[in-house]
Image (cartoon, rainbow, N blue to C red):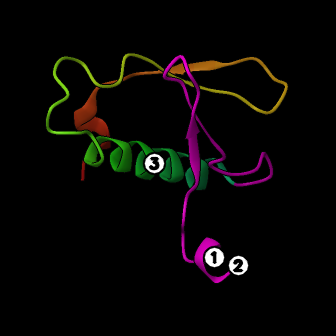
Amino acid sequence: VNEIKAGKIDFRVDKYGNIHSAIGKASFPAESLAENVKAFVANLIKLKPTAAKGKYLISITLSSTMGPGVKLTTNAAEYSE
């Protein structure tokens, strides 16, 4: 519980290369959700293997559990800190 409160993020990757993770709840303020998305994508970019070539993030789509997806830009410069 302490790790999660400190900001630990768990994610999983399916066999198609899609990354699944919870970044917040619908009740969170929009600013908090945006901050969580930026931190998560920045962390994914940092985890990119050095051997990986080409475009690492092809598309980003956010959705609630059973809701429609909303596409985001994949410009890495927006998410890097």
Label 1 close to label 2 by CB (< 8 Å)? yes
Residue nearest the viewer, comparing 42 with 9 = 9
Give me the residue at 53% from left, 46% from top. 34
Q: Magenta stretch mostly in which secondary structure?
A: loop
Looking at the rendered structure, the kind of residue marked 1 is Lys
Q: Is residue 81 above or below residue 16?
A: below
The residue wearing badge 1 is 5
Q: CA distance from mark 3 to mark 1?
A: 15 Å
Q: Which residues are magenta?
A: 1-28
Looking at the rendered structure, the kind of residue marked 2 is Val
Give the image location of residue 71, x and y in percent.
54, 18
Q: Given this view, does label 1 or label 2 mark the residue nearer the observer?
A: 2
Give me the residue at 18% from left, 17% from top. 54
**Residue 40 - label:** 3
Question: What secondary structure is found at the residue carrying circle 2?
Answer: loop
User: Where, by quadrant of the figure, is residue 70 drawn?
Assistant: top right
Looking at the rendered structure, the kind of residue marked 3 is Phe
Question: What secondary structure is found at the residue carrying circle 1?
Answer: helix
Residue nearest the viewer, comparing 5 with 79 = 5
The residue wearing badge 2 is 1
Give me the residue at 58% from left, 56% from top. 32
